[in-house]
Image (tube, rainbow, N blue to C red):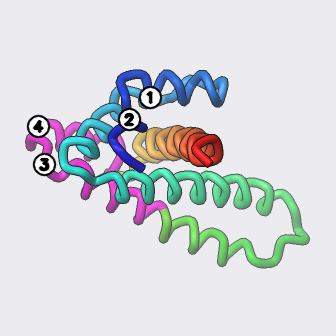
Amino acid sequence: MSLTVFHNDFLNLVEIFTERKLHHKKFLQQLIDETSHHNLYEKFEELAFTGKYVNGLLRAVKIGQSNPDVTNLQMIKEDLMKNMEKVISLIKELTSNLTNETLGEIKIKFIELSKEQFTNLTQLIDDLDQIKKYLNHLKRTEN
């Protein structure tokens, strides 16, 4: 991934491609700005990949809770928690150069896992899933 991917309309193009509005577009733009400014493209791509993976795990847990044939639900939940922690860790890495005030806002909105933050985080993970789909599309069309 490179700077050319993150042109001004990147998030708009994600929404057009996925036919879905992003929940946390302003924060995603902050992440993209930090990624571009500090050349952290691999970290951002890892975040998008992990977000897509976590979104799949969330779907698996929902399905598994209503299906008595699913026997590995506990393993899925453990993998989910481990990867949600990874998402939070990557967010912290990507935003570590922001002001303390901005970092505090991010912590309140996404990292302190109350019910509201969990909702915000799962919405952000869904956004990252959409971004990863678009990045995959870009990779396929480049070749």
| Of the image marks 4 and 2, the number of the one nearer the N terminus | 2
| Of the image marks 1 and 4, the number of the one nearer the N terminus | 1
Q: Nearer the viewer, mark 1 or mark 3?
A: 1
On whether residue 23 falls in the magenta region, the answer is: no
Q: Which circle marks residue 101 in the picture? A: 4
Q: Which amino acid type is shown beneath numbered disc 2? A: Phe
Mark 1, secondary structure of its residue? helix
Q: Which amino acid type is shown beneath numbered disc 1? A: Phe
The residue singled out by tag 3 in the image is 97
Q: Residue at x 64, y 47 (%)?
A: 140
Mark 3, secondary structure of its residue? loop
* Mark 3 vs mark 2, CA separation in Å: 19 Å
Mark 2, secondary structure of its residue? helix
Q: Nearer the viewer, mark 4 or mark 3?
A: 3
Considering only vertical position in the picture, is 140 above or below 83?
Answer: above
Furthest toward the right, the residue is 69
Give the quadrant of residue 27.
top left
CB atoms at circles 2 and 1 under 8 Å apart?
A: yes
Q: Which amino acid type is shown beneath numbered disc 4? A: Glu
Q: Which amino acid type is shown beneath numbered disc 3? A: Asn
